[in-house]
Amino acid sequence: MYARFGKRLLDIFVAGTGLLLLSPLLLLLAALLAVVNRGNPFFRQVRPGQIGTNGEERLFTLVKFKTMTDRRDAAGQLLPDALRLTRVGGVVRKASLDELPQLWNVLQGDMSLVGPRPLLVEYLPLYTPAQRRRHQVRPGITGWAQVNGRNTLSWPDKFAYDVWYVDNLSGALDMKIIFLTFIKVFRSEGISSGTSATMEKFTGHPE
């Protein structure tokens, strides 16, 4: 019952209330990042969502605050994340404030407050059948993998946590994840992997 109805009602209530109460902060951050990024304060990217009735992942446009510039090298390739991360962006990212615009994605029904993080479309053909089960639920702003290591986890471990969440979804688990998320954000844990400012690309590691 919760997975079918209660989870969506919770998403609508929290996302709607959050957007209303946090609107002054959202406007302030948008203005500040517009100056830092010399224009666009938002990062938009198409991501795969929940598997639909046609058996394929629904695609949607994820929205975040933009914490990195678009600086490129002489060959036109984007510079490493660490070189593109702005000072203001680093502060916003450390506090996880860059995730706040995703409340709009939740309100629209593309995402949930809790669920496996939406990754890149280019990863879809790299998943094993077991790993792809992470898309049986809506992707989330936070999730079981995020509160158990976030970007410090290996890809196989991250997918294992995601699939475990799918198999054990409940209201009590969602409340636990939300509570643990606040603790992780307060402690600024798991933001970077051991070798990258964000997370290394997934290249199709085995389970």
Image (spheres, rainbow, N blue to C red):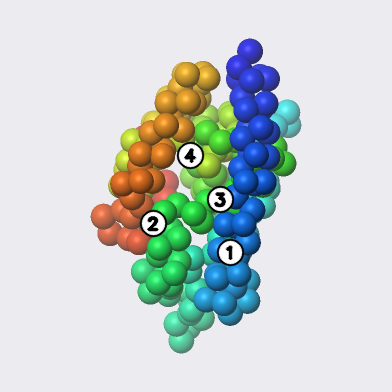
**Few, some or many residues within 10 Å of mark 4 (<14, 14–19, 20+):** many
Q: CA distance from mark 3 to mark 1?
A: 13 Å
Say which residue label 4 marks: 142
Say which residue label 3 marks: 100
Residue 108 percent location from the top left of the image: 72, 41
Whether 123 is drawn above or below 68: the answer is above
User: Tag 1: residue type?
Assistant: Leu
User: Tag 2: residue type?
Assistant: Lys
**Few, some or many residues within 10 Å of mark 2 (<14, 14–19, 20+):** some
Q: Is residue 157 left or right of residue 177?
A: left
Who is closer to the viewer here, 117 or 100?
100
Q: Sequence-wise, which precedes: disc 2 or disc 3? A: 2
Q: Sequence-wise, which precedes: disc 1 or disc 4? A: 1
Q: Sequence-wise, which precedes: disc 3 or disc 1? A: 1
Looking at the rendering, in which quadrant would you find the C terminus? top left
Residue 94 numbered mark, or none? 2
Mark 4 and mark 1 in contact (Cβ < 8 Å)?
no
User: Tag 3: residue type?
Assistant: Leu
Q: Sequence-wise, which precedes: disc 1 or disc 2? A: 1
Say which residue label 1 marks: 28
**Few, some or many residues within 10 Å of mark 1 (<14, 14–19, 20+):** few
Whether 198 is drawn above or below 34: the answer is above
SS class, disc 1: helix
Q: Sequence-wise, which precedes: disc 3 or disc 4? A: 3
Give me the residue at 31% from left, 46% from top: 187
Who is closer to the viewer here, 118 or 171?
171
